[in-house]
Image (spheres, rainbow, N blue to C red):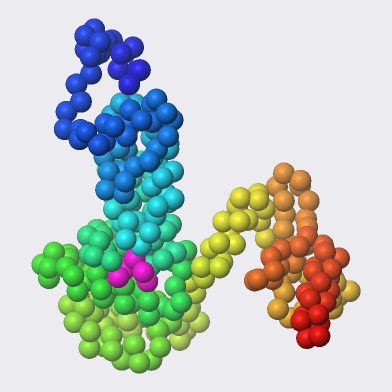
Amino acid sequence: MKAAFASGMQESISARVTLRDMRAAVFEAVITFMYENATSVPEADIAEVLQAARLLQEQELTNATLNLLIARLSPASCIETWRMGDVLSLPSLAHRAKLFALKHLSEVSAQDSFATLPAAWLHELLRSDELAVAGEQVVYRALQQWYGLQQPSAVAMSDLDLLLRTVRWALLPQETVNEANGDAMVRASADGMAIVAVSFQDALFGRPPKLRKSAAQINQDAMDERLGRRVVHNARLPKSMADKVPADWTARQYWYEKKEKRVWVFAHPIHGEYRSIEMMTLKICTLESVALLDTL
């Protein structure tokens, strides 16, 4: 708002800003933030508050509203949040909403809003190696769900072909493949059956489709990025250390960028990470002691 009064615009001459089509509840949220530096915005109003903050060039309110939207991401809201980020030219918001959809495709595809997803955005999701699904059939079912909610003439043949190619058919269980052979969606494409057949042919000749990442792996990648480290591939754990690592623990060597050194990290899916064999051993001894006490 300060920018409007200081930029030589009409507002700086008249000392007045006209806010058209802004509801009272939205204006109240803006004023409350400006005077109390607090945001308490109902779910139904948050998009309008963000638009108002952008209009008034209130960067602090924009940031606070963005954080609120990201914190409230859910299967029901992520598509609309993605669209909001695109419409308002907020790439960081669109990116966070897309990441949420990648991690929760099964739940997101069950929402009414999933039908409104543009074909190009759906293609982005389904082709991604970052898609976290329990199995490839989740991807196939999501595509079926989306296609079944579209008007037959609304999906261009070129878009359908691209979407069918995102399914890694050779990873599907046999009973799902049998179902796909009679699927109206697959048969609606002139190349549908050929797309399925080529996927199996590639796998047969040593070019199998890449496995999708699990949700746990995506979380691990996010942690590695936050800690400024990357996995050192093909690193061999010395046998003297390997003998001490239980089967349910994993050992990875990381290169830490800031420290410029390699560190072995020992991790357990429940008990977390430990950066030395001694710390891991101590944790295991503690767990065994607790388990022994529980039996007494």
Q: Quadrant of residue 181?
A: bottom left
The secondary structure that dominates the magenta segment is helix
**In the rendered view of the protein, which quadrant contains the N terminus?**
top left
As drawn, 284 above or below 175: above
Q: At 26% across and 31% down in the image, what residue appears?
A: 27
The residue furthest top is: 13
Q: At 26% across and 36% down in the image, what residue appears?
A: 26
* Nearer the observer, 86 or 42: 42
Any magenta on residue 108? yes
Residue 250 percent across, percent down from the top left = 71, 72
Image position of 272 (left or right of 191): right
Q: Quadrant of residue 55?
A: top left
Image position of 216 (left or right of 267): left
As drawn, 173 above or below 285: below
Q: At 79% across and 76% down in the image, what residue appears?
A: 290
The magenta region covers 106-110
* Nearer the observer, 231 or 41: 41
Any magenta on residue 254? no
The residue furthest right is: 240
